[in-house]
Image (spheres, rainbow, N blue to C red):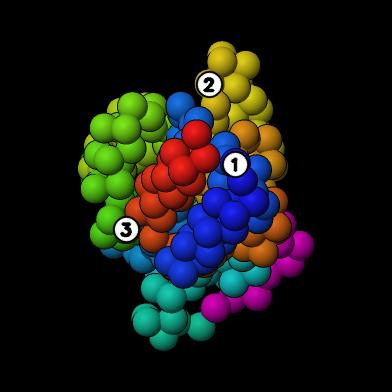
Amino acid sequence: ATPTAIMVGTGLGAESGILIKGGEHLENAHKVTTLVLDKTGTVTVGKPSVTDVWVAPESSEDDMVRMAAALEAQSEHPLGAAVIAYAANLHWAIPETKGVQAVPGKGIIGTVNNMTVRVGNRRWLLETGITQFPDDILAQYENMGKTAVLVASENRLLGIIAMADTIKPDAEKTVRELISMGIDVWMITGDNERTASAVAASVGITKVIAGVMPEDKASKVQELRKAGQVVAMVGDGINDAPALAAADIGIAMGTGADVALDAADIALMHGNMHGVVEAIRLSKATMRKIR
Ligand code: ADP
Ligand code: MG
């Protein structure tokens, strides 16, 4: 591409909030054959809120939510923020905690009232020795695209807190356009398979990589590249930074974490999904001018 074409393309992008960090990315974007979208904060707005609470027999909602909120008060996860907001609405005093630790991709653990309390996903609680889950309740939430976190004290399940996130208004249209451009669209997430598939289906995505540990997102991107695909990764989170760097083109939501923006080649400042289509179209137009 001529320097002039690159300059014009970069300028046009910037005007619509698409920041391209270097001419080579503008030249490469039209070659993308596979696009991987992170779920939370990319396909969805990334601000979940509590929709349902299920309480185990012999447990109380009051105790269960308080304990969960006590731990989540020390988490930086959007799911934690949803639990805290819910507890704050109920005006319940939050108990004191000791030794709280976030466990990436799994949940959060700490001591509340001298008991070890865990708030996190089913897979993690299964690993820690809880064997009985209300599967029908979990299925009901997850099939609606809700993320259900379980609350356990020692080896006793206290309840479930289900949260829903809002799908971005332009998500479905963006996926449709990407597919019509011949691009393979995937969604990747640390969330469970059922929730992920429900969210993906609601925007027309059929290819889902779920239950991915934060450190494994980059290797999933590498696998697609090794299979011969030119891969663009779109994400917003701290977790996504290595995958953004591993992709042929990393695209970050401007609404996301600074590390994601730093790792990306292109930043979508408005945080809307359609910017992905616009960036690829801009690349096509730029390359047409050159040949
Ligand atoms: P993603 O960013 O793709 O949603 P994460 O790796 O952050 O995924 O989290 C994966 C899963 O781990 C969440 O869906 C949730 O089940 C569990 N989890 C992680 N952090 C927390 C937390 N602070 N509280 C409850 N659950 C959590
Ligand atoms: Mg995200």
Tell me the quarter of the picture where residue 96 sits: bottom right
Where's residue 48, x and y in %? 39, 62
Side of 135 where 118 appears, left or right:
right
- Residues 182 and 157: in front is 182
The quarter of the rendered structure image containing the N terminus is: top right
| Vertical comparison of 178 with 269: above or below | above
Residue under numbered circle 3: 168
Q: Which residues are magenta?
A: 94-101
> Callout 1, which amino acid?
Ala
- Residue at x 42%, y 45% (from the top left corner): 285
Whether label 1 touches label 2, CB < 8 Å: no
Can residue 8 be spotted in the picture?
yes
Mark 3 C-beta to ligand 2 under 8 Å: no
| Vertical comparison of 15 with 109: above or below | below
Q: CA distance from mark 1 to mark 2?
A: 23 Å
Residue under numbered circle 2: 229
- Residues 229 and 134: in front is 229
Q: Nearer the viewer, mark 1 or mark 2?
A: 1
| Vertical comparison of 228 with 266: above or below | above
Where's residue 153, x and y in %? 56, 52
The dot on residue 72 is none
Q: Nearer the viewer, mark 3 or mark 2?
A: 2
Tell whether position 97 is magenta.
Answer: yes
Helix or strand or loop: what does disc 3 sit on?
loop
Q: CA distance from mark 1 to mark 3?
A: 34 Å
| Vertical comparison of 94 with 36: above or below | below
Residue under numbered circle 1: 1
Side of 283 where 110 appears, left or right:
right
Helix or strand or loop: what does disc 1 sit on?
loop
Tell whether position 120 is magenta.
Answer: no
Where's residue 69, x and y in %? 52, 69
